[in-house]
Image (cartoon, rainbow, N blue to C red):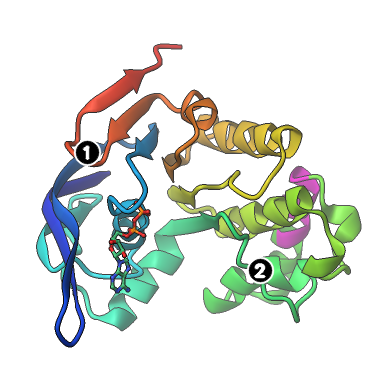
Amino acid sequence: MIKTEKLTKVFSTEDVETFALRGVDVHVRKGEFVAIMGPSGCGKSTFLNIVGLLDNPTGGTYSFNGTDVSNLKEEDRTQYRRGNIGFVFQSFNLIDKLNVYDNVELPLLYLKMKGAERKKRVNEVLNRMKIGHRAKHFPQQLSGGQQQRVAISRAVVANPVLILADEPTGNLDTKNGIEVMNLLSELNQEGATVLMVTHSARDAGFAHRTINLLDGQVIRENRN
Ligand code: ADP
């Protein structure tokens, strides 16, 4: 589903060039749950942003479901992303001015889903994530664990084939962190491919495979 070859990203500012990725080869098959690890600053977030079509690489190739998407224009990236990919971030990234329901509805509005179908789908997901009773509340009225459940609801409401998670438990305590990891694991078992960046060995333990971003080597493989 995801194949990067010699993926490179250089950030150029006026007089400084920062090499964020230096030739990354990663292959994730449909239905897998893969964790990416590596020291701070090695390019994990940059990698996830490129795989999530939030940014383009400066070199190498990235193919998604067999299509080369390395050099899409921004509007094409956005369209591709909305139809296929759900994002979960460490800092939840919810819109403060929108209540829980409206935050989760947003991806379906972008996809122009019809009213009744939209309402059914949003309520279905909120109930599935055990956050339906908070639909009218605003993000700042929720605990971190609840906010991340809303963020996961938003990520999956449009039924993406790929879920990308950037340190999804980084702002959560142990209990909520494990709950979030169990949710990601369930979503994977229900068919979504999951790619997660983490520095947590505990979280990586939920994945089928853990890859070191620096050399593309498998650090650990779970055969359960
Ligand atoms: P990680 O997630 O592994 O901590 P990042 O992907 O955030 O690493 O960053 C990799 C490198 O790229 C770092 O040196 C960082 O400072 C640099 N970097 C990331 N984003 C930008 C940017 N927009 N402009 C310039 N440098 C950046």
Q: Is residue 134 left or right of residue 116?
A: right
Element marked by disc 2:
loop
Mark 1 vs 2, N-terminal side: 1
Judge by depth and name the residue closer to the eye, 183 or 200: 200
Q: CA distance from mark 1 to mark 2?
A: 30 Å
**Circle nearer the viewer, 1 or 2:** 2
Q: Is residue 221 left or right of residue 178?
A: left
Give the residue drawn at x 37%, y 56%.
45
- Quadrant where the N terminus sits is top left
Give the residue drawn at x 17%, y 49%.
4
Q: Which residue is mark 2?
A: 94
Image coordinates for residue 180, horizontal then vertical, percent: 65, 39
Label 2 neighbour load within 10 Å: few <14, some 14-19, many 20+: many
Give the residue drawn at x 21%, y 41%.
214
Relative vertical location of residue 25 with respect to residue 105 in this rendering, above or below: above
Res 27 label = 1
Give the magenta range. 122-129
Is 49 contained in the magenta span?
A: no
Res 65 label = none
Image coordinates for residue 62, horizontal then vertical, percent: 18, 56
| The quarter of the displayed image where residue 38 is located | top left
What amino acid does circle 1 point to? His
Decide: marks 1, 2 in contact (CB < 8 A)? no
Would you say the magenta stretch is mainly helix, strand or loop?
Answer: helix
Judge by depth and name the residue closer to the eye, 177 or 19: 19
Q: How many marks?
A: 2
What amino acid does circle 2 point to? Leu
Image coordinates for residue 5, horizontal then vertical, percent: 10, 48
Q: Indicate the quadrant of ligand 1 in the picture.
A: bottom left
